[in-house]
Image (cartoon, rainbow, N blue to C red):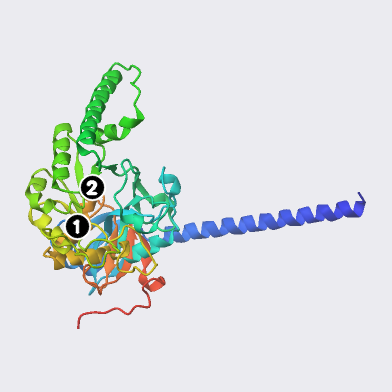
Amino acid sequence: MSMKLRAFRVMNFLAALSLAMFFSSAVGAQEKKDKAEEKKKSSVHAVVGATVLPVSGPMVRRGTVTWKDGKILEVGAELDPPEGAEVHKGEGLYVCPGFVSVVSMGVGIETSSGNIRNGLNPWDRELAIALASGITTVQALPAPFFGGFGQDRPLSGGSNSAIIKLTRGDLGGMLVREPAMNYFSLPTRQLELNYFLMRERFSQAKKYLASRAEARAKKAKEPKLSSSLKLYVAVLENTRPTVFSPANNHEVRIVLSLSKEYGFDVVLNEPKDAWMMAADLAAGNVPVLVKSRGRDFDFNTTGPVFEKGQMAPVRRPAAFARAGCLVSILPYRRGITLSGLAGRDLATLHVDAAFAVRGGMSNEDALEAITLNPARILRVDDRLGSIEKGKDADLLILSGHPLDYRSFVLKAFINGKLYYERDKSRIFREVPLTRDK
């Protein structure tokens, strides 16, 4: 190799090294600058002069909400914001907790099964749409591989799920808890035989838990758990609620008897006829997940929306609420779609609550059914679902009442941090605001 060629290669290497060092120092300087600017921002915030809907208490006119380091400090009328706080004007606007969807599919996750933690996607496009629609927390379920209309079929037993916050661009703030709920499939064939086998497995799972507890007390080796009993053991451990999707009231009674016999918490998913026994559900503290709109897409356009003797879907949430049941309103569809089905997906959860009002539910109950009630069902109401001192500052500033179809989310905060601002987003920005005259 000639001396000139060697010298040329050395010069190239030194030039590349110098360039790399320059860019590295530039990136480092930019990161330090960004961190310094972040520190300059006040960690104390206040919304002043708004109509505040805490959900857990009465409406506050000319209200102030303050928060610091992601936690709510104070809620009240005509309070002075703390010194040095970043103030958000609320005159003529509404403030309420971020909406909590008790179910969603394919929002913020890129996996069809297995560990959701490893499939979180903080840059998912649907997160931005959901935030613009006021949703700050969801129970995320993997979307089926085939997608589409399968998003609204009953979930298979043992389906994994997680509670995630829609902190777009911030992976660290997303996961709240995984798994979120158990999903238990009821048999559809050979009912008597399968119900007998189901009870047998619950009995075996109970014996396993007793043996395991005894082994742990003696610090001995724990008994091996059969794969066929894993879901049954998870249900009996009751560390999270179990969702059943009964097809009729006979199945509702079977579920209630199992719950009473084995002592685990039950959530009923779309129990269409169970409004007839709503008082029994309320007495047993059994929550219900219901839709306020008619059945999903059906190619049979000549059939009735609901069968004779059934209650109109728009009236079901109110019927359960009047009986004292804990009601969480389901979105018309679990996912967000841009395929011509606008108005029938997760992005219109607040509209589904408004439909429930049309069916006889009060504004207060309907708002609670998309905020505090789903948080209670998911067992995260110590952090989410209402505006109370010490809870996470997951807040919405809206142009009008959250159940008014004309209202838009102007700002959405999660853990006290601004994740959506209408004026700076392309979503809904071009739609003019409509206010009462």
Q: CA distance from mark 2 to mark 1?
A: 19 Å
| For residue 429, above or below residue 345 | below
Q: Which comes sooner in the sequence, label 2 or label 1?
A: 2
Whether residue 85 is visible, yes or no, is no
Q: Position of residue 220 (x, y in %)?
A: 33, 16
Residue at image point 52% right, 56% down: 32
Which residue type does callout 2 highlight? Ser
Residue at image point 85% right, 56% down: 8
Q: Which residue is mark 2?
A: 245
Q: Position of residue 218 (x, y in %)?
A: 29, 16
Secondary structure under badge 1? loop
Q: Is residue 104 left or right of residue 255?
A: right
Q: Position of residue 139 (x, y in %)?
A: 31, 51
Point out the image quarter for the C terminus: bottom left
Which residue type does callout 1 highlight? Ala
Q: Is residue 422 left or right of residue 15?
A: left
Question: Depth check: 222 or 71 in front?
Answer: 222
Q: Which residue is mark 1?
A: 369
- Dot 2, crowdedness within 10 Å: few (<14), some or many (≥20)? many
Toward which corner of the image does residue 126 lie, by quadrant?
bottom left
